[in-house]
Image (cartoon, grey):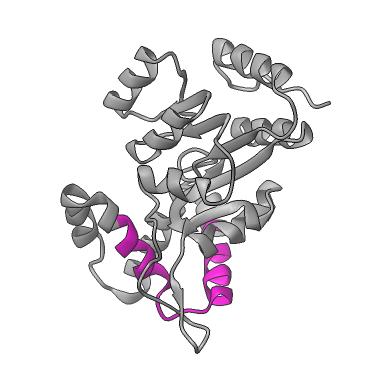
């Protein structure tokens, strides 16, 4: 049976995770956020930057403005902006290209600690899912690099046109807050464990028996994590 290496885990978080793994029988459900949790950085933001670079469109200001007024709608619109008019295969090839460049530049990176935790769970017979606000075809493209079956990724799901190309609308539920939890419940049992880094992950974290908050500077979420005795791990740089 796999053990969880210490790596760069905070010692108290590592000890708690090891105790959880030893105490939990096979078949438990774990759910991870993807961006800024399974990976350092945000793949959708990298793809949006590539859209700006290749088209010359000023795509960032409207997205950021919408995030201020309607974050849920902004996430759905971002997903549609990235995939509309493309086939799933084209989305996958583009994702691989942009992700490879971002790894080389250091803008994105794998999180070895989260990956080690995923592997420890997988080898113990846990049912592990990723629920993400990035487009589903984007993260399913990257999932095999993580050792994660693509069908265990739930994300923003566009409509598939008769032509095979992706289009709007994004299907409900939208993967933000309660939408993430609802989507998981459509496919799996109540989560035993949840890991996330943002307000968007709050409902998943609150629903789980064990919670891991990856703290990348969200003061409100960090305060909740502390007050509710969640494991709080400073984001790795």
Q: Which residues are magenta?
A: 75-99
> Compared with residue 167, is residue 116 higher up or lower down, i.e. above or below?
above
Instruction: Please tell me which residue lies in front, 190 or 66.
Output: 190
Quadrant of residue 206 within the rendered picture: top left
Residue 10 spot, x, y in % from top left: 54, 15
| Quadrant in the picture for the N terminus | top right
* Image-based side of 159 in relation to 125, left or right: left
Total number of numbered discs in the rendering = 0
> Compared with residue 11, is residue 83 higher up or lower down, i.e. above or below?
below
> Compared with residue 166, is residue 216 higher up or lower down, i.e. above or below?
above
Q: Residue placed at 27% from the left, 57% from the top?
A: 74
Residue 130 spot, x, y in % from top left: 56, 46
* Residue 80 in magenta stretch: yes
Q: Residue placed at 17% from the left, 48% from the top?
A: 68
Do we see residue 123 in this rendering? yes
* Image-based side of 102 in relation to 66, left or right: right
Q: Residue placed at 48% from the left, 56% from the top?
A: 155
User: Predominant secondary structure in magenta?
Assistant: helix
Quadrant of residue 172 within the rendered picture: bottom left
* Image-based side of 208 in relation to 18, left or right: left
* Image-based side of 70 in relation to 215, left or right: left
- Check the image and name the residue furthest to the bottom: 163
Residue 135 spot, x, y in % from top left: 46, 61
Instruction: Please tell me which residue lies in front, 135 or 229.
Output: 229
* Residue 182 in magenta stretch: no
Residue 90 spot, x, y in % from top left: 54, 76
Q: Residue placed at 75% from the left, 31% from the top?
A: 26
- Check the image and name the residue furthest to the right: 1
Do we see residue 111 in this rendering? no
């Amino acid at each position: 049976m796999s053990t969880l290496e210490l790596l760069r885990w905070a010692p108290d978080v590592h000890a708690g995770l090891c105790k959880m793994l030893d105490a939990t029988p096979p078949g438990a459900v774990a759910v991870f956020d993807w961006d800024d949790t399974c990976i350092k950085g945000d793949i959708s933001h990298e793809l949006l930057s590539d859209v700006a670079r290749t088209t010359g469109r000023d795509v960032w200001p409207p997205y950021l403005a919408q995030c201020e007024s309607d974050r849920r709608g902004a996430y759905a619109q971002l997903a549609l902006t990235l995939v509309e008019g493309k086939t799933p295969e084209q989305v996958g090839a583009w994702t691989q290209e942009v992700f490879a460049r971002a790894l080389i530049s250091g803008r994105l990176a794998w999180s070895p600690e989260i990956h080690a935790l995923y592997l420890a769970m997988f080898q113990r017979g846990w049912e592990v899912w990723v629920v993400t606000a990035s487009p589903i075809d984007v993260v399913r493209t990257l999932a095999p690099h993580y050792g994660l079956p693509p069908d265990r990724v739930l994300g923003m799901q566009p409509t598939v046109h008769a032509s095979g190309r992706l289009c709007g609308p994004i299907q409900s539920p939208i993967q933000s807050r309660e939408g993430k939890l609802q989507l998981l419940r459509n496919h799996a049992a109540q989560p035993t464990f949840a890991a996330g880094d943002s307000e968007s992950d709050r409902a998943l974290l609150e629903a789980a028996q064990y919670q891991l908050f990856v703290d990348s500077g969200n003061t409100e979420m960090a305060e909740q994590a502390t007050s509710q005795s969640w494991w709080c791990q400073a984001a790795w740089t």
